[in-house]
Structures are given as structure tokens and as C-alpha cells.
Amino acid sequence: MWEQIRINKRNSVLLLAGMGIFLLSLGFILGAAIGGPESGWVGLMVASAVWLILMLISFTNGDQILLASSRAVPVTPDVHPQLFNIVEEMTIAASLPKMPKIYIINDPAPNAFATGRSPETASVAVTAGLLARLNRDELQGVIAHEISHIVHRDILYVTLAGVMLGSIVLLSQVFLRGLYYSSIGGRRYSSEGRGRDGGAQAIFFILAIILSILAPLFAQLFYFALSRRREYLADAGAVRLTRYPEGLASALEKIANTSVSMQAANAVTAPMYIANPFRGRNAAHLFSTHPPIEERIRILRRMSQGVSYRDYEESYRAVTRRTGIIPPSAVKDEPIPPRSPSASTPQAPVPTDSARVNRQIGDLMRKVNGFVFLPCSCGITMKIPPNFPAPKAQCPRCGQIVSIRR
Amino acid sequence: MDCAICRNPMITLELDNVETDYCLACRGIWLDSGELEQLLGDSGKAQEVLRSFQPAEGVQEKLRRCPICGKKMEKVLVGPESSSVLLDRCRKGHGLWFDRGELEAVLQMGRFDSQKKIPSFLGKMFNKPETNPNPTPS
């Protein structure tokens, strides 16, 4: 996998350089267009400042921006002990230097993503809908997939690309809106000759056009970044970490069979997720960033003999009739036998009817938001919001007074 | 979520996988559409029950605001004409509000929704038996 990691590191540098060249030349052209040829250098300096700031932000806070825009909340182990247990387990299996930070997204659709600059500063975010629907083996498969993204260094590239794409989309929106409003305001003066106003407007017009052409191009770049290949490789890595292909396969099946779209995802963040967060409209277009989920499931289910990269490669060939998904060095992987399903550890039943799932999601989000759960001996559970003023609550059923410990 | 009457934060109560919201300060009960769905099994039935009550005309009681959307709720008459109870219903179908004591009145009435799931659940939740002497078969 080392060449894949190297490619990802190289792509990150290329992305930063490409973005820099684009911004600097844009600054030079703008400066020259507004204030004559000698002002081009001023524009260049302004643009380098913008580039520097953008780079600093995406390096230091890029993951935070993506997490915040997905409405992900950092959680403590008591909110979902099993999730922490699995992440810890997979951290050890993948020998990451540090356990990733764990976030929960308040969304009923099942999905997950990883972000961060390096394995030391990585974060894993999962939705409440995912936690409510998956059993331990399935959740382990999903977490192993995300940990593989961290090991393969997919996260740095995706985080950088996400922040840059986001800012370009923002800039193009600003210019397009500016163009719209200036064209309304400027109409009254249009008959009185085209003076300097017209020149400035023409620049804005050109800029807006450049940006609106480039924004989708960058979007495409971002989509290539998390291309099908990266998803297949993360699947292969997940299987190797868990030694249990069926876990991830059945998790992907559950994700594919859910018809809810994610509210917290947008076009910029969509490629980060383990499965396409959108359903229905536009799904076909966005599915181009993710391999068809049915194909991924078929590859995983065919791996009954072993779980090494070589086994994934063979299964991939048999299912897709294409070759070369795994880098050549990794195909020479030692054989790893699959583990048997975890029958020894009894699993908590996972609710299947929608009412139960929805209540589980609601409970999870209450825990994330700091609610205290007080089970009363009479059988009811009181869920106390964080802004509840009194230190004690009286059970309305049996009259018992329970103290609220935070 | 804040109480429709005293604005204190409400707590959520859960019994047998069904929830309801309750104000410990003024003892008001808020049964929202999601909770009705947990009780009745699907969202269609929940909205059907909410819609089944007739709006009351010319009532002097103070209008309450929906804890979810903050809009003024409408008064609805529940039960037979002789012993009907005045409840508050969100106009957007977010849920149903019981003032203090209104639950007891509803439980005495015996007739509420077609399967009587709502009064029996709330009676169980707040440990108040249905006191209707001769329940009408539905």
C-alpha cells in the first residue's frame, strides 16, 4: 500500500500548488485589469496572502470546518461505549499512533466519514442513524473502512480538497450575486454612456464566469480524489483489519436499503462518506464518485477463502472482470484466513421496525446533547434536558424523588 | 423543548418504548406526532387521530403556543358533547397538549381514539386508572 500512500501525499502537494498558481495568476490578472500593468504585482501579493491564509486554515482547521459543516458533535465514551470500543480495537489492529477523535452526526440516515491531517490528528464521524441500525460486526466493518482511509492518507487530500472546493464555491457565489445585484442597480445608468463603471462590471462579469466554470472543475477533481479506487482500497483494508468480510458487506447492504437522504451532507462533503448520502434525485450523477454499492457487496461476499489484499484482488477480478485494483506490492500479501462470525459474544438485538430505530436515534441524540437518563424503579425512564434547573426530579408515575447526577 | 404554559424545560418520559413530554412544574403533558407514531405504529394513523378532533368555536380559554413551532395552537373538543374536554392542538399537526387535570377528564370519558390506545397508555404512564364505569365497545 506504500505507493498508494505516496500517491496521496504527492496529490496533496499538487493540489496545493495548483490552487496557488490559480489564485496567484487570478490576482495578477485582476490587479492588472483594475489598475494598469504595474498594479499586477499588488494583485499578486494580495492573492499570495489569500492563498497563504487558505492554506493555513485548511491545514490547521480543515477537518474542523468539514465536521462543523456536517453538524458533527464530539462525544464521550458514555454516549456510545460500543462505538469507542470498536474504534479502539481498530486503532490497535491498524497500529495507528493515536485513537481518532469520535464524532456523531445528528442524522437519521446511516453514513460515516473520516477526516484530518494525519493519522495523529484524524477524526471519525458516524451518523446516529448508522449506530441505531448496525450490529457490532457491521459497525466494526464501517469503522475499519474509515480507519483504512486514515491509514491510506486519503483524509489529508480529501480535507484539503474539501476546504478549497468549499471556498471556491463560496467565491463564485459571491461574484455571481454581486453581478446580479450590480446589473439591477446599473440598469438606470446604462444609457448614459459606458464609463469606468462598465469596465469594473465587465471584470466582475469575466471573474464570475471564470469562477463558475472552474468551480465544477474543482468539484470534479475532488470527486476523482475519492475515486472508486480509493473506496475499493478502503474496503480491502477494512476486510484485512476485521478478517470478516460479511460485517462490512451486510453494513453496506443496510445502508443501501435505507431510503432516507442525509440532511447534513452537501455536494462538497458527499464524496467523503462511506456511501453516497443522497437518494433519488441526482443520485445517478453523484454515484459516479462511489462504486456501485451492490458491486462492493458482491466482492466482499465472494471472499470466503481469505481476507488478504490478494484475495480481494481475486474477488474483484471475478466480480467486475477488470484487473489491478490493488497496487502490485500489496498483492504479494501473506495469506490471512477469515475469522468465524462472532457467535461466542452474544450481540444485542438490533431493532428493525422504523419506530424503534427512530426512538434509538432520538435517544442517541439526546445523549449527545447532554440529556441525563434516569430510569425509575417503577418502569419509566425520565430523560432530563441539560437546561433543567432543579437538582432533583419527582417521578410522575410513582412519586419517587430521583436526584439528577451530571 | 419548553412547556407551553410555564416555559420551563420539559422532560421526556419513556414507558415500553413509547415516549411523551411532561412538565414537572405545571404538570402539563405534550404528546407530539412522533410520539403518537411510536404508540400507534405509523405516521398516517397519528395524523388521522390528530385530525379527528373538532375545533371548538368561541372559547375564552387562553391560547397556548406549540412547544415545537411556537405558533398559537387551536382549541379542540374531545369526547361526547355532554362531557367533552377542551385540549390544545397545533395547527400544523405537531401534537396535542393536555393541561393539568385534563388527562384525568379524558380518562373518565373513556372514548378518545378508535382503539383507545392513547388513554390507556397515558393512564399507565401516569399511574391513573381508567375510571370509566361502562366502557363503550369500539
Image: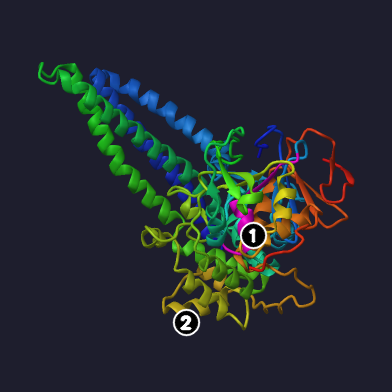
Which residue is pictured at 48% across the width and 69% down the height? A293
Percent position (x, y) of residue B29? 70, 45
Classify A66 as above or below A48: below
Query: Which residue in the protein does label 2 denote?
Result: A318
Whether residue A177 is situated above or below residue B34 in the rendered picture: above
Q: Position of residue B67 (x, y in %)?
A: 61, 39
Chain letter of the residue carrying label 1: B
* Foreground pick, A358 / B53: B53
Identify residue type, mark 2: Ala
Q: Is residue A259 toward the left or the right of residue A178 in the image?
A: right
Horizontal relation, residue A218 to residue A270: left or right: left
Residue in the picture at 68% in, 37% down: B3
Label 2 marks a residue whose chain is A
| Amino acid beneath label 1 | Gln
Q: Residue furthest front?
A: B82
Which is nearer the eye, A65 or A389?
A389
A193 or B42: nearer the viewer: B42
- At mark 2, the secondary structure is helix
Q: Is residue A98 magenta?
A: no
Quadrant for residue A191, please give it: top left
Instruction: Say which of marks 2 and 1 sits in front.
Output: 1
Look at mark 1 in the image and give the residue it sits on. Answer: B38
What segment is highlighted magenta in the picture?
B27-42
For the C terminus of chain B, the quadrant is bottom right
Real-space Cα separation, disc 2 to disc 1, in angstroms = 46 Å
